[in-house]
Image (spheres, rainbow, N blue to C red):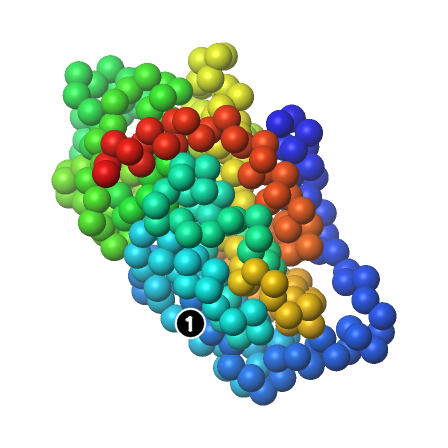
Amino acid sequence: MKETRRKLMLAGAMAPVVMSMPGRALAQAGDYYKDKIIIINVAGGASGGHTRYARLLQPYLQKHTGAREVRIVNMPGGGGLKAANHIWRAKPNGMEIFFGNASTLILASLAGSPGATFDPTKFTFLGRATSEPRVLAVGGKSAIKSIQDVQKLKRPFVYPSQGTDEDFYTMAVLSDALGFKVKAVTGYEGNADTALAVIKGDGDGHITGWSESRGPILAGDKHPVLMVTSAPSPDYPNIPIVTEFAPQAKREMVRAMATVLETHRSYIGPPGMDAQAVAAFRAALNAAMKDPGLLEESKKGNRPVAPLDGALQQKQIAELTKASASLSPVLKAAVKAIQ
């Protein structure tokens, strides 16, 4: 497990890997998408974080693939499983791509979720766009002010959920590791809906990416009580880090969870995707992630990017899925509890 974490952290710091293809083959791969339409199936609603990132990258992917159009199609449902299952069955010609959290695919498989009709290691991983810490936040007017307050509740911690996504599974792991009960309220469409429920007081709190909660936190509408990450950040030093806060006996489990979550927002193709399409999309994504225009937009919009090359990600997903098997009993219990 430590070796897998070391590889993942090293990979995140590495520059994108250059394709090791002969010059002629690389040129052919580069023309693969020229004048074609690429459909990006976004695992979430139109107002969600995935969509905002997908739209941020859209013009740069179009530029570097040479595609006539990069079309964003929202596919909410099942916490990302609807979009994942769609891509699992899609033609492997690379014209339809999934964009969402790679962690959902891993965790749903480990949980034996009936909605996951796929093997996460057999998807074609095309590259990560960003990875950011996830935060457990409560409403700004809530009586809960700290993670210790959550632990002391004499009732279950109520959280609005958009389905069995990575946040649902993270809550299950936190509940087990930190010793508090949880109650999921399902039926929400996405982060915007769950955030509104928390702010209105219809739920105690929820987990989301830091960039999604940053605005409401600064406005006082939400309050952070715990960061779910494997390393502290100087940007928010006063918020407890779960890998340091959890009891010693549970730390390996929460480290495994945090490492899975760091796979985050990624482009993923169907199994057996055409080799030229794979090479072309990975190369275009690597170029897009280094494009000065994208980097400037990312900075201005407080949408940080953290690219990871698809070829490297493909190997790590297989390693990570195997190394995180210890999470399976807790995740399966969480799924069973809502059936």
Question: Which residue lies at the image location 35% right of the left edge and 49% below the top edge?
Answer: 115
Out of 248 and 320, give the one closest to the viewer. Answer: 320
- Left or right: residue 242 versus residue 289 is left
- Left or right: residue 23 versus residue 323 is right
Mark 1, other Cα within 10 Å: few <14 / some 14–19 / many ≥20:
some
Image position, residue 64 (x, y; %): 63, 75
Question: Which residue lies at the image location 15% right of the left edge and 43% below the top edge?
Answer: 200
- The quarter of the image holding the C terminus is top left
Q: Which amino acid does label 1 sit on?
A: Ile
Image position, residue 107 (x, y; %): 45, 40
**How many marks can you see?**
1
Question: Which residue lies at the image location 15% right of the left edge and 38% below the top edge?
Answer: 201
- The quarter of the image holding the N terminus is top right
Please tell me whether residue 74 is drawn above or below residue 191 in the rendered image: below
Please tell me whether residue 129 is drawn above or below residue 114 in the rendered image: below
Examine the image and state in which quarter residue 67 appears: bottom right
Examine the image and state in which quarter residue 321 appears: top right
Please tell me whether residue 72 is drawn above or below residue 307 in the rendered image: below
Out of 302 and 2, give the one closest to the viewer. Answer: 2
Image position, residue 45 (x, y; %): 31, 61
Question: Which residue lies at the image location 39% right of the left edge and 27% below the top edge?
Answer: 330
- Left or right: residue 44 versus residue 317 is left
Examine the image and state in which quarter residue 263 appears: top right
Image position, residue 281 (x, y; %): 63, 68
Residue 139 seen in the current view? no
Q: Name the residue under label 1.
A: 72
